[in-house]
């Protein structure tokens, strides 16, 4: 770097550039907040869905699965598991765990009650109805 | 050691290395569970191992950053630390809280842990990387505030260098953005949107300031190049990092329910994110080539150069590989993401912490540099760990490409587990590379115990 470009110029560009892009980011985030009601399926945030989300969290489902592509990559994507498998299959599957098949990946049994299973399914249904710009590419997730 | 209070850095560095070892051991467990699914089940299910693996990573890097700051700030400000006692107290609080959290993960079912630790008062748990119980999260905030208070008070009474200011700015940003971990709305899209304000604005934002400051500090010390030149570079690098990285957050807002204009903002700005890392590589090599002294610590110089190169490859190149929205549509949430995550964290953050440890530890132990024998061993560990990480990344990338092909791209897509079975060969090879990484880490640890002739620190 030549002698004409000084450290204080670099510093000023840093502060100016950072402030500018922070403000731009905040403006985009603000606009996102305004747009979200059209996309995020908040109308269907029922008591049951809210409870399902909490069950999802306190059992650390994200530690193996992904949800809308985020999480771990050890077990299937569950953002679209509702249309892929349907409610009855999901509940039966969760209850049948662990399979105990030798050498296969195992999912613990969480001992959910029937109501808890319904709440989890409600949460997965709600998640599947978020407008994700057509992601994932196909039903396999 | 120029200032006695710098000594508080030592326990931080030792804890960082110990927790790093734990992280790698749990990584190997998970790697094996990818191919031998029932390994250690039900004692350590995959989700528990992963939580331990990623949380240990975060905590050991935080220990490393804190140790680095306690070592650097007295030298930068040319004054003793405001309160060494507070620094030591915080060390023990953080270590005990961290250890208890890990023990909690391993011994109690997660739902029980949540109940025991007040998750019903304020639900924050069960989100990736933010799995810590509420009490641990509060503990992190307390430790961070005490740490920042200590450093800020030190800086107020001493010299204010650009490196010191950038480091503090990065650390304050780290603490502030962590506060978003307490916000967990019922609305999944909002939850995910602000979750990234912790995760992305940490690793692709303020952490890069910390990374730049650490690297600049070590380069001044080992090359003797004029501070004005190095600090000018530092400002240019962090400008590029934040200009690309802040709006670059948008590359996480493609498919989570957020408006579709993020596909443009996120793609364009995150495509620029490799540039600061490339600048960092050029910077490191340039400074070493223009060195005005031959510092006896060759190992620290190697880590500094390695950080530039591996951060560019891992964060820059492997990030770019899947950051454009049309590509990410297929790769989102596959082993491609895992490949990028591994090399980026190692290349940028693990290596820069190992770099500052490499420079500071000999000084903290009363010598300018380790013996030639110890340094050769440390350099072996550098190559073993770095080359192993390159292979881990390549195998995961291969796994990811095949996974995308079979499960996402094909006209006849197959189910997730069917695709996983097809790629087990790559998982086995990743595990072998992981074993070599562990060997490298053991060599690294052993290098601290190698004796030999050394010169006393100036």
Image (cartoon, coloured by chain):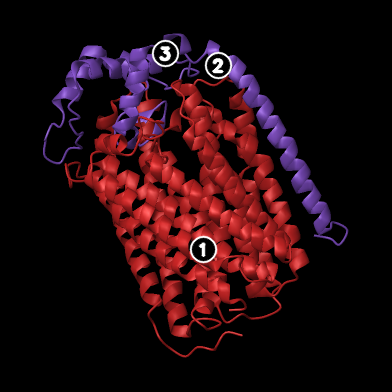
Chain colours: A purple, B red
Q: Quadrant of the N terminus of chain B?
A: bottom right
Labels 3 and 1 share a subunit: no
**Crowding at mark 2 (Cα within 10 Å: few <14, some 14-19, many 20+):** some
In the structure shown, which secondary structural element does the residue marked by tag 3 occupy? Answer: loop
Mark 3 or mark 2, which has the lower sequence index? 2
Residue B85 spot, x, y in % from top left: 51, 67
Instruction: Residue at 61% x, 85% y: name it.
Output: B458
Relative placement, left or right, of B108 versus A37 is left
Label placed on residue B171: none
> Whole-Å distance between the Cαs marked 1 and 2?
44 Å
> Whole-Å distance between the Cαs marked 3 and 2?
14 Å
Instruction: Residue at 75% x, 36% y: name it.
Output: A20
Foreground of the two, B283 or B23: B23
For this orientation, the residue located farthest to the top is A43
Report which quarter residue B297 is drawn in.
bottom right
Q: Which residue is mark 2?
A: A36
Q: Which residue is mark 1?
A: B87
Label placed on residue A45: 3
**Crowding at mark 1 (Cα within 10 Å: few <14, some 14-19, many 20+):** many
Q: Is residue B288 above or below residue B449?
A: above
Labels 1 and 2 share a subunit: no
Tell me if I can see residue A139 in this picture. no
Query: Which chain is home to disc 2?
Result: A
Relative placement, left or right, of A7 versus B62 is right
Instruction: Residue at 26% x, 16% y: name it.
Output: A85
**Crowding at mark 3 (Cα within 10 Å: few <14, some 14-19, many 20+):** some
Relative placement, left or right, of B159 versus B439 is right
Query: Which chain is home to disc 1?
Result: B
């Amino acid at each position: 770097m030549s002698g004409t470009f000084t450290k204080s110029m670099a510093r000023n560009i840093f502060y100016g550039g950072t402030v500018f892009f922070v403000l731009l980011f905040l403006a985009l985030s603000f606009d996102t907040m305004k747009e979200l009601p059209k996309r995020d399926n908040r109308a269907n945030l029922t008591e049951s869905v809210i409870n399902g989300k909490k069950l999802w969290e306190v059992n650390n489902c994200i530690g193996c699965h992904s949800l809308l592509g985020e999480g771990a990559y050890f077990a299937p994507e569950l953002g679209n598991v509702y249309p892929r498998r349907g409610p009855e299959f999901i509940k039966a599957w969760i209850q049948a765990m662990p399979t105990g098949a030798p050498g296969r990946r195992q999912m613990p049994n969480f001992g959910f009650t029937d109501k808890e299973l319904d709440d989890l399914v409600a949460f997965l249904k709600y998640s599947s109805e978020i407008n994700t710009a057509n992601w994932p590419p196909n039903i396999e997730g | 050691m120029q200032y006695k209070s710098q000594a508080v850095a030592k326990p931080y560095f030792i804890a960082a290395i110990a927790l790093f070892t734990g992280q790698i051991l749990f990584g190997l467990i998970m790697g094996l569970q990818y191919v031998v699914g029932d390994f250690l089940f039900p004692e350590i299910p995959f989700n528990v191992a992963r939580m331990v693996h990623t949380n240990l990573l975060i905590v050991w890097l935080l220990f490393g950053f804190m140790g680095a700051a306690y070592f650097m700030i007295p030298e930068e400000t040319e004054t003793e630390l405001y309160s060494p006692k507070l620094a030591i107290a915080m060390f023990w609080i953080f270590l005990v809280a961290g250890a208890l959290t890990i023990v909690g993960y391993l011994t109690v079912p997660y739902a029980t842990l949540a109940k025991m630790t007040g998750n019903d008062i304020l639900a924050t748990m069960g989100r990736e990387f933010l799995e810590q119980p509420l009490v641990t999260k509060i503990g992190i905030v307390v430790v961070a505030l005490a740490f920042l208070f200590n450093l800020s008070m030190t800086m107020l009474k001493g010299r204010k260098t650009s490196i010191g200011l950038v480091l503090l700015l990065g650390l304050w940003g780290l603490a502030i953005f962590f506060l978003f971990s307490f916000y967990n709305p019922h609305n999944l899209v909002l939850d995910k949107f602000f979750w990234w304000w912790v995760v992305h604005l940490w690793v692709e934002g303020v952490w890069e300031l910390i990374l730049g400051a650490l690297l600049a500090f070590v380069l001044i010390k080992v090359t003797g190049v004029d501070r004005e030149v190095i600090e000018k570079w530092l400002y240019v690098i962090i400008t590029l990092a934040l200009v690309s990285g802040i709006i670059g957050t948008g590359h996480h807002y493609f498919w989570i329910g957020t408006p579709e204009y993020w596909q443009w903002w996120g793609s364009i700005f995150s495509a620029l994110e490799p540039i600061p890392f490339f600048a960092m590589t050029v910077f490191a090599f340039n400074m070493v080539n223009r060195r005005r002294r031959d510092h006896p610590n060759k190992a620290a110089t190697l880590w500094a150069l390695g950080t530039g190169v591996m951060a560019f490859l891992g964060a820059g190149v492997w990030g770019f590989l899947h950051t454009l929205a049309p590509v990410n549509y297929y790769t989102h949430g596959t082993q491609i993401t895992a490949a990028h995550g591994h090399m980026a964290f190692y290349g940028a953050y693990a290596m820069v912490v190992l770099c500052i440890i490499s420079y500071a530890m000999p000084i903290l132990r009363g010598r300018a540099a380790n013996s030639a024998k110890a340094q050769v061993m440390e350099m072996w560990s550098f190559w073993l760990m770095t080359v192993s990480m390159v292979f881990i990344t390549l195998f995961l990338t291969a796994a990811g490409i095949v996974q995308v092909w079979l499960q996402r791209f094909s006209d006849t897509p197959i189910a997730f587990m069917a695709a996983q079975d097809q790629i087990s060969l790559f998982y086995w090879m990743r595990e072998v590379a992981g074993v070599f990484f562990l060997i490298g880490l053991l060599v690294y640890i052993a290098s601290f115990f190698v004796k030999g002739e050394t010169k006393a620190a100036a």
